[in-house]
Amino acid sequence: MALQGPIPVHFHQVFPHGCYIVGEVEKVRDFDASTPDRFVQSRDKQTGEPVWQIAVMDGDPTVKAAAKTVSVKIASVTEPVPPPMVPGLPFTPVEFDGMTVTPWVNPVGRLAYSVKAREMRPARPASKHTTTGATTSGAASAGARSGEAA
């Protein structure tokens, strides 16, 4: 099969209604290298760069509350900086470039998706969004929004 590793996707395929920052940028723990006394930051398998994550809320009104938050991982030498807050909004709208999803089976045997991005930037106004081809299959949408990550 030609498709191996992370699957490239566009932002609007994963978040057709946009997404909003609901957490801080955090280092991702390398669970194999870390010990209870020593934190080791995870490194991206392709680039070797440190991996960071940020929790975002899916703007899709049809997604159940328990599945609205997902962590997006970003490989970057420096800590990614979220866009500035938008006056009058309780959450900061954000978009991601260079996105991939990686399917995996979680410990309870369910299909989940790890969502990664190359970079984070301020969301563009809705009128500039192109939504052609922005739908995903129900399984991909539900898994990507499950909040579970590899």
Image (cartoon, rainbow, N blue to C red):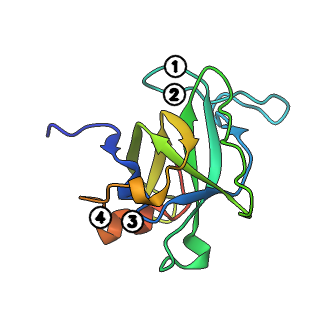
Classify mark 1: helix, strand or loop.
loop
Sequence order check: which comes first, mark 4 or mark 1?
1
Q: Quadrant of the N terminus?
A: top left
Looking at the image, residue 49 lies above or below residue 23: above
- Residue type for callout 2: Asp
- CA gap, disc 2 to disc 4? 28 Å
Question: Looking at numbered disc 4 in the image, what kind of residue is underneath it?
Answer: Thr
Q: Where is residue 110? Give x, y as percent.
A: 43, 65
Q: Which residue is mark 1?
A: 48
Residue 109 sits in quarter? bottom left
Q: Is residue 66 left or right of residue 115?
A: right
* Secondary structure type for disc 2: loop
Q: Which residue is mark 2?
A: 44
- Name which of mark 2 and mark 3 comes first in the sequence: 2
Q: Earlier in the sequence, mark 2 or mark 4?
A: 2
Q: Is residue 70 left or right of residue 132?
A: right
* Residue 79 in the figure: left or right of residue 99: right
Which x, y percent locates residue 86? 70, 54
Mark 3 to mark 1: distance in Å? Answer: 28 Å
Question: Where does label 4 land, which residue?
Answer: 135
Q: Residues within 10 Å of mark 3 (few under 14, many from 20)?
A: some
For the residues bearing labels 2 and 1, Cβ distance under 8 angstroms: yes
| Residue 134 is at least partly visible in this image | yes
**In this rendering, the label closer to the viewer, 4 or 3:** 4
